Image (cartoon, rainbow, N blue to C red):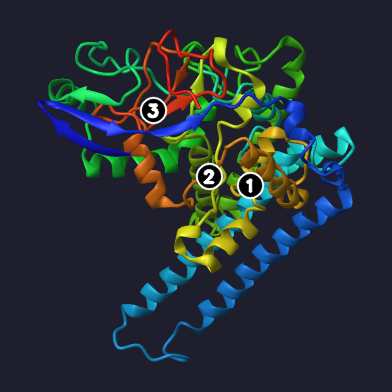
Amino acid sequence: MSDGSEQGVTTVKQNVCVIPDLTIKDLLSAIPAHCFKRSAWRSSLYIVYDLVVISGIYKSATYLDTLISPEYISLPHPLLYPAARFSLWAGYTFWTGLFATGLWVIAHECGHQAFSESKLINNSVGWVLHSALGVPYHSWRITHAKHHASTAHMTQDQVFVPKTRSQLGLPAFDPTKEDILGSSVSDEVMKELKEALGDSPIGATIGAATYLLGGWPAYLIRNASGQKRYPKGTNHFNPDAVMFAPHQRESIILSDIGIVLWLAGITGSIYTFGFWTVFRLYLVPYLWVNHWLVLITFLQHTDPLLPHYRASEFTFPRGALATLDRNLLGGGGSIMGWIGAHATNGISETHVLHHVSSKIPHYNAWEASDALRKRLEQAGIKLQGAPGGWGEVYRVFKECKFVEDEGNILFYKNASGLAATRPAFTDDSASDSGIEVDKI
């Protein structure tokens, strides 16, 4: 997106997003048949592998901790010993949290019935793994399935639903001073929006950091960033919550039991081993897992390049393709990119494929993604985002502020009221709420 200012009006040259008209058959037929096969044995090996890696990280940190003393190394100042020990255990929490996110991803696959051919095995393994990571398995499985069915739908999606201009209490849209698609805006309106939204680097940094650290529990407990039409107090622990059906009540209670056992386990461990030991070995890595979960999913579904749809323009294939693949930690170089993808079982790198067919296990998703990308390229669609990391979260957080109340295909606008992207169609009849757009 490039811009220019003339006579009190700022105009930008926008990217063009091809709105897909592909069918689900078009997408699934591009994927090799063997990619759909699920194996409980093979999936279980990834659980064992992640646990072995995490155990190795713990053993390494414990051993190295014994060497941080004047008896083994000579440091120029006594305070450097606790500093070195802090750095060692900070590294432990980071790497443990990253590989524990891989376990989280496997539990997530259980919820999609991608772990094995058996529903009993899937739900049993998923309940154990997610409960151990503080996740109400069935409750989240149910709402997550709704998210997959209605991704990028303004009134049906369950999470990362954009706030509209009116929901944020911004000045009403004025067609004489700004373009509905966000290609131009007057300096007067731009100033009003910036004052209302705030656009300082410090504010964006604090907002992004708060989102990464508290976004996941806030979503579970009070529906933060979730569907706006749900009543106040909606949460994932109430069997009577609006997003659950009566026949799902027992599953929600079972999920709550898992969380109670998780909390009891933490409490018992603190009583037995002490708070600081549990904090260092489990609670901080747990916070890292939550952080990675929010970072990965936020960047998969939020970007100025991605459309959101109201009911009249939504289809399942359009929703599935309103996501991005990103290389987690790829901004740190090829080695860090490989580690990020490897540790988290490719959840960020193969996400578009995951939305097209969520029952494909992660170990087959790489080949399936390659095949799907070739089909999408034939339709002029490329869904590869910038590498996932903190800098990208900051950029997206600044660029994605609100969407308009009008229109059926929506793109985020920034604090200046400008949108980086506009829709384009492959036929000659489509329009966005009566506003003709570029035809290609």
Marks 3 and 2 in Cβ contact (< 8 Å)? no
Task: Return the residue nearer the eye: 424 or 131.
Answer: 424
Above or below, 109 against 25 in this view is: below
Q: CA distance from mark 1 to mark 2?
A: 8 Å
Q: Residue at x 25, y 11 (%)?
A: 175
Q: Which residue is mark 2?
A: 296
Q: Do labels 1 and 2 touch, CB within 8 Å?
A: yes
Drawn side of residue 354 relative to residue 18, left or right: right
Residue in front for this viewpoint, 385 or 280:
385
Image location of residue 378, percent across then percent down:
64, 39
Outermost residue to the left: 7
| Precedes in sequence: disc 3 or disc 2 | 2
Residue 116 visible in the displayed image: yes
Which element carries disc 2, helix, strand or loop?
helix
Check disc 1 and report the residue beneath it: 347
How far apart, in angstroms, are the residues tagged by discs 3 and 1?
Answer: 24 Å
State the image coordinates of residue 435 (x, y, percent, origin top left): 40, 12
Question: In the depicted view, which residue is nearer to us: 304 or 206?
Answer: 304
Q: Quadrant of residue 100?
A: bottom right
Residue 381 spot, x, y in % from top left: 57, 37
Dot 1 amino acid type: Ile
Amino acid type at image mark 2 = Ile
Q: Quadrant of residue 116?
A: top right
Which tag is nearer the camera, tag 3 or tag 2? 3
Secondary structure at badge 1 equals: loop
**Label 2 crowd (10 A; few <14 / some 14-19 / many >=20):** many
The answer to whether residue 112 is seen in the rendering is no
- 206 to the left or right of 146: left
Please give the residue where the numbered disc 3 appears in the rendered image: 412
Horizontal and vertical percent position of residue 155: 53, 14
Q: Label 3's element?
A: loop
